[in-house]
Amino acid sequence: MKKLLAVLCVWSCLVGTGSAEVFRLGVVGTDTSHVPAFVNLFNDPNAEGAYQDFEITAAFRGGMPDNPSSWERRNKYADEISQKGVKIYDSLDEMIAAVDGVLIESVDGRPHLEFARPVILAKKPLFLDKPMAGDLVDAVAIFQLAKENGVPVFSASSLRYSAAMQEIRNASPYGQTHGVDAWSPCHLEEHHPDFYWYGIHGVETLFTMMGPGCESVSRTTSESYDLAVGLWKDGRIGTFRGIRAGAASYGGCVFGAKGIQLAGKYDGYKPLCDQICVFFATKKSPIADEETLEILAFMSAADESKKRHGAHVTLASVLEKARTAKVTYFHITLTDAGETLLDGEKVSEAQLLQKLTLPADAENRYYRVILKKEKNVPMEKVLEACGKLGDATLVKFEENR
């Protein structure tokens, strides 16, 4: 009986209720092509099924000034969706108050925790697009904050919900999956761990078909390619090939008990958005938090393996390090008077660099910066400041508009 009720609940979410009340969604970060694509799906007046019950009504630009892929697109996509009826807010808090659920879409993962924090404290269900966070430390913090506040969160790459991946995950025609070789483009971005920026798609392809249970990773890397080999606790082996030269598509090869087969094609954004509808309707993530953390730990362990010249690194070790990390926040303000304030106090450039440099004996410590500029400070000064943060990571940029 319980199974029947569960099936009926999911079915009702997928087909839509036809309710007159629309669940209002807000987008944080208009710096990715995902934003207009999602608006086209959720706000289509001819949409069927669950999409009738949801609408993207609001957005906050966000954007990271030291990442051209983020900063140079945020206004373009904000303008595009505003022409489709989405209200653009200059205040994140005001946007959160105006919606029922939030999609953090920022292409840059570094501000995801700081964007998620007020959403979670406002008790709004939250979807985080890839990468879930700028590093494993922040991902752990997001899940912990959500758990403490009883707020559901969900994060996934759209590759997970391609039909071929789901078939192999749930009822593979090739029998028991003994191994998977997955691949995807793997462009790098200097502010992110290597696989977090784009390799996440191929890594999630790997985990979707293999399932959780990876214990360790060994990585071989060159300028144009990566090969990360994961060892699962049941003895299976799965690999991710990251591609930065030559043909770079998405895909995988499954080694099954009944045959070896390519996994099929990528199906676009709609299958993921279908699951986002179910998530906001049921307030339950379709992916266990532990599996999402395992995917991120795989990528972080691969970075550690690279530092250690291909040594095997356990996922447990990087997760433990992330959970026990000591994080210090600094607030920097660039004033119209030409001054730099650190936590409200005027500092020189030398003093700022000294404050943001980790001690030589620092162990598992991280410095984070929230940078704010007053209205008349030119962006050239902001970029100059971004390049002088010492050992600190910029995790949020605020501008007085």
Image (cartoon, rainbow, N blue to C red):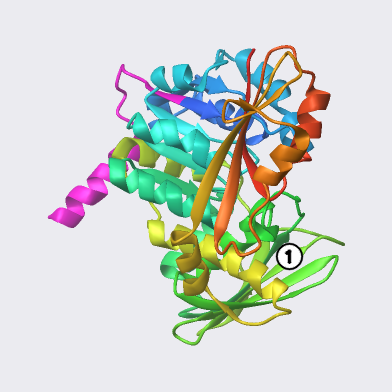
Say whether residue 208 is visible.
no
Front residue (pair 127, 97): 97
Indicate the position of residue 29 as horizontal and vertical percent values.
Answer: 60, 30
User: What amino acid type should be assigned to the residue bearing mark 1?
Assistant: Gly
Indicate the position of residue 32 as horizontal and vertical percent values.
Answer: 67, 34
The structure residue drawn at horizontal position 63% and vertical position 53%, both measured from the top left corner, is: 266
Q: Residues within 10 Å of mark 1 (few under 14, many from 20)?
A: many
Residue 14 located within the stretch drawn in magenta: yes
Say which quadrant the C terminus sits in: top right
Q: Is residue 334 above or below residue 195?
A: above
Dot 1: element: strand
The structure residue drawn at horizontal position 75% and vertical position 50%, both measured from the top left corner, is: 189
Furthest residue toward bottom: 235
Say which quadrant the N terminus sits in: bottom left
The structure residue drawn at horizontal position 72% and vertical position 47%, both measured from the top left corner, is: 390
Side of 356 relative to 323 (left or right): right
Indicate the position of residue 310 as horizontal and vertical percent values.
Answer: 70, 80
The structure residue drawn at horizontal position 73% and vertical position 65%, both measured from the top left corner, is: 242
* Image: magenta residue range: 1-25
Say whether residue 355 is visible.
yes
